[in-house]
Image: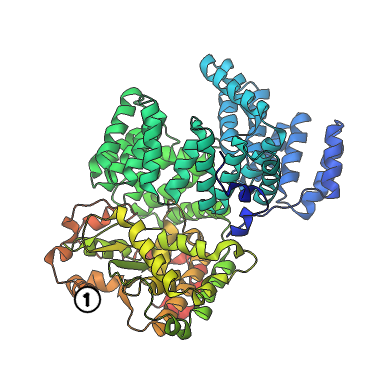
Amino acid sequence: MLKVGASQIFAGRSLSSDGNHLPSETATETAPLETAQSRMYAGDFSAAIEALNQVLTEDEDSVDARYMRAVCFRYLKDPAKARADLDALKRIVPDFGRAYQEEGHLYRDTGDWSRALLAYQRACQFNPALLASWKGQAAAFRSLGKEAEAEQAEAQARRLESLPNDLVAVTHLLHEGKLLKAEQLCRAYMQKNPHDIEGMRLLAAIGTRFGVLEDADFLLETALELDPDNIQLRLDFIDVLRKRQKFEAALTQATLLYDREPDNPLFQSHLAIESMQTGDYEKALALFRTILEKLPDDAATLTSRGHALKTLGEQDEAIASYRKAARIKADHGDAWYALANLKTYAFSDDELATMRAREAGSDLGFQDRIYLCFALGKAFEDRKEYATAFEYYERGNDLKRVQTRYKSDQMEEELQAQASICTPDLFEKQAGKGCPAPDPIFIVGLPRAGSTLIEQILASHSLVDGTLELPNILALSHRLRGRKRVSDRTFYPRVLHDLDAEKLQALGEDYIENTRIHRQGAPFFTDKMPNNFRHIGLIKLILPNAKIIDARRGAMACCFSGFKQLFAEGQEFTYGLDEIGRYYRAYVRLMEHWDNVLPGEILRVNHEDVVNDLETQVRRILEFCGLPFEQACVDFHKTRRAVRTASSEQVRQPIYKDGVEQWRHFEPWLDPLKSALGPELVKT
């Protein structure tokens, strides 16, 4: 039986109303494009190019026109011009699968089956509904003498051919970022076919892209009740549960797959990753060892194993695992960046040459190129070749910014709404409500501002559990926005005025309960999600006795450190000097507001003060948190615990001052940052 209420998701309830940063969906039905398309179908490719040139004269970044013109050039046997359009297309939309499919066709036409295969594989990675790419993979594998792999690719092609046309179209729209159209078509299909498993899975995928994780969770759970043996459904469910920080539930699902087929490396890998999320690193490492006994040259597993070892502080073993992955697969950017992200690793001349050669190559995947650019930036910075280092940092940021589509204006509008709506009247009206638990210590601010150091200091105390960057407050803010996120952008935080005492207490109690999985039994715990500074009003309403520490670092040092860092997810504002400068400025303004409306409730800890006088700042932090002094907090680097952030290796060392002014080496290139910050912040 379909769960009661699931039909609501299929009948008119728009997932897109929960979208935060919606992707653009440029209309393609313009007259010149229609003309070009009709001429292509007629085989008149030269005439089609004339129409497409008209479109590109007005909009050189038109995805549809670039793609169609590349196809025309291929049919006209002009691969150089086709490739130029494809290169431009991949710069505009780096995850556009059809561009890689066309690239595969170009290599196929010249008999270069190895490169054709790579292109077809990337096409399917970005859009698994590309039938021609699956068939292209099969042909490539067969030409390379890999019959088993060819049969697997053909099986995927047959599966696609068996799907209803509407669902194939939904998959194309989903993976080309046209989420509004994908949702409309998928909901229309599901109204007629409410028990269609693939339709439910696709609707859940659309919800995940929009950030509507509760609906995606519900859809996938319902679909699994109807089809419990569907492996892809369960893999999707694990992904959504992890995004929702429901780690125990994700572990349960991964265990079900593992128990079904214990020798399957894919299921072993998922169980290892979910074991890491729940803190069972020994089990994760044992599973990684099992996988590597069968697949000793699997670069992804070697890298994942390195991540687990790094988190546990086993740096030498982590380095060995990362280096082996990079040796085996030199274009595996994740391994190279993992080495750089240790902050303590020095690349050899040979390693540097390999990275540069790979980054300069045309066959490198988009994400791998991003990884390598940031790794090369760090490598050249360590060698004091600052101009070259900045060139790579800037290139990596430019690529990442295309991928994230972050808009500073929208973020500033959201932060201003917090200040204008969370007034003294709100806190007076809601005083005395919420959950009275004093357990959480929130460490907020910007990334790379010293929050991991403060957390390590506190986690070294016998009464405090160090956790990680918990997403619970951010998830709650999304839920409070509800389905008015687009139509009424200030519904949250405005709704905070309307929450009654029972609701505020329930929300606080839910936070305490849902974060319990990360605790080890101490009476207090840290939550160091830096972005929680946006929601201090919400925090103090639902958890009035929680402590809040603002980890502050000088503007230039903090912003440039963020610019140099490639984050696992989120923090889209860091991928540009102007963007991060504007964000820092807006952060300072909002923190000034919280200081005014919540006097004495926030402790500001300047990173430079911690570096210059550690013990004084440790005593100050502990006093604010109501904790007795313990020497272990001063000797924080001796504390053994899992640390998952970019500063994991730095907080395992004593305080050092060398990093405070590192940004000055790059000052000749930082005028855009200074301009965005303004003169008063540049001096801080």
Q: Give residue 147's quadrant in the image.
A: top right
Q: Is residue 186 above or below residue 613?
A: above
Q: Residue at x 25, y 58 (%)?
A: 651
Q: For the view shown, which residue lies furthest in the left direction? A: 631
Q: Amino acid at mark 1?
A: Arg
For residue 550, what is the image quadrant? bottom left
Identify residue for label 1.
620
24 relative to 285 in the view: left or right? right
Q: Quadrant of the C terminus?
A: bottom left
Q: Nearer the viewer, residue 420 or 612?
A: 420
Q: Is residue 181 above or below residue 410?
A: above
Residue 29: x and y, percent?
81, 48
Give the crowd class for mark 1: few <14, some 14-19, many >=20 residues within 10 Å.
some
* 485, 583: nearer the viewer: 485
User: Measured from the top left, where is residue 185 in percent x and y?
Assistant: 70, 45
Q: Quadrant of residue 134?
A: top right
Task: From this view, report whether residue 143 is shown above or below residue 538.
Answer: above
Q: Is residue 119 left or right of residue 583?
A: right
State the quadrant of the N terminus: top right
Percent across and percent down for residue 96 are: 63, 42
Is residue 666 among the parts visible in the rendering? no
Residue depicted at 33% across the width and 33% down the height? 324
Identify the residue shown where x is 37% and y is 39%.
252
Q: Is residue 417 visible?
A: yes
Where residue 390 appears, as percent x and y from the top left, is 45, 56
